[in-house]
Image: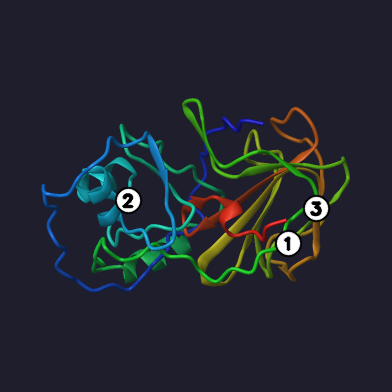
Amino acid sequence: MALVARFALVLICLLGVACHRTEVPRQTHHARHVKPPRAYIVKPGDTLYSIGRRFGIDYHVLARRNHIRPPYRIYVGQRLSLRGTATPARRLPGVTAVHRAHAKRSHRARPSHQPAHKPRLHLIWPVRGKVTSPFGRRGSRMHDGIDIAAAEGSAVVAAASGKVVYAGQRLRGYGRMVIIRHAHNVFTAYAHNQRLLVYKGQKVKQGAIIARVGHSGRATGPHLHFEVRLGTTAVDPLAYLPRR
């Protein structure tokens, strides 16, 4: 189910990284370029500079198009717009204190040739079912997670251990939703639930039942909308979930 609600609440967090200033090699015009596709999904080993060089796009332009600020960190599974301007990342409910605390520590920028970051996440599938809608663009809108079809009332489990930072239904369109913060500033979100079985501030273990599948909010049938965010950046959950 396409999620069209506009996020009116604050960002959960901003990935804060202490950085250092490094000279970045200039883009040359001697490399062979190919016509860029509309979008590109970041792969292991990619950098903002290497992606720009591959498609003949200055990495500064690429950063502006995708609303990426210094330290220009990108993530495996992240979708980059190569033509036009990307839709700004939608915001999840939470507190601004984390954002401000991390922002104060981020004074210097890392080079844009820093390889795509992939934290060592050991996620498990949050529900048993078939992926009916993948991560990526849906027409003019961005689908920031995956949809997993499952029977009404099926158990939804925590993909990893962490602390519940949101449990409620204030966000129009998402219905009853849980957001968990994990190690390395990773967040997972679980939406359209029938019932929530956890509360804000509760610590949960990986595999603990946190909700029941439903179709609350803007949904056509019972399913789980599942998101993975590295800081504020939404990434493809399939890049971090075990294959099955």
**Along the polypeptide, which appears first: circle 2 or circle 1?**
2
Q: Which residue is mark 2?
A: 68
Residue 119 lies, with reference to residue 128, above or below; the image says below
In this rendering, position of residue 141 left or right of residue 225: left
Between 104 and 23, the one lying in front of the other is: 23
The quarter of the rendered structure image containing the N terminus is top right
Q: At 82% across and 42% down in the image, what residue appears?
A: 150
Q: At 36% across and 58% down in the image, what residue appears?
A: 46
Between 118 and 46, the one lying in front of the other is: 46
Q: Which residue is mark 3?
A: 211
Task: Locate residue 107, reporting x and y percent.
Answer: 25, 68
Q: How many marks?
A: 3
Mark 3–mark 1 distance (CA, rounded to whole Å): 9 Å
Which amino acid type corresponds to the residue marked 1 in the rendered image?
Answer: Ala
Between 111 and 98, the one lying in front of the other is: 111
As helix, strand or loop, the secondary structure at mark 1 comes to loop
Q: Which residue is mark 1?
A: 158
Crowding at mark 2 (Cα within 10 Å: few <14, some 14-19, many 20+): some
Which amino acid type corresponds to the residue marked 3 in the rendered image?
Answer: Ala
Marks 3 and 1: which is nearer the front? Answer: 1
Q: At 11% across and 52% down in the image, what residue appears?
A: 28
Mark 2–mark 1 distance (CA, rounded to whole Å): 29 Å
As helix, strand or loop, the secondary structure at mark 2 comes to loop
In this rendering, position of residue 126 left or right of residue 4: right
- Pick out the residue farthest to the front: 32
Task: Locate residue 71, reporting x and y percent.
Answer: 29, 62
Task: Locate residue 110, reporting x and y percent.
Answer: 26, 67
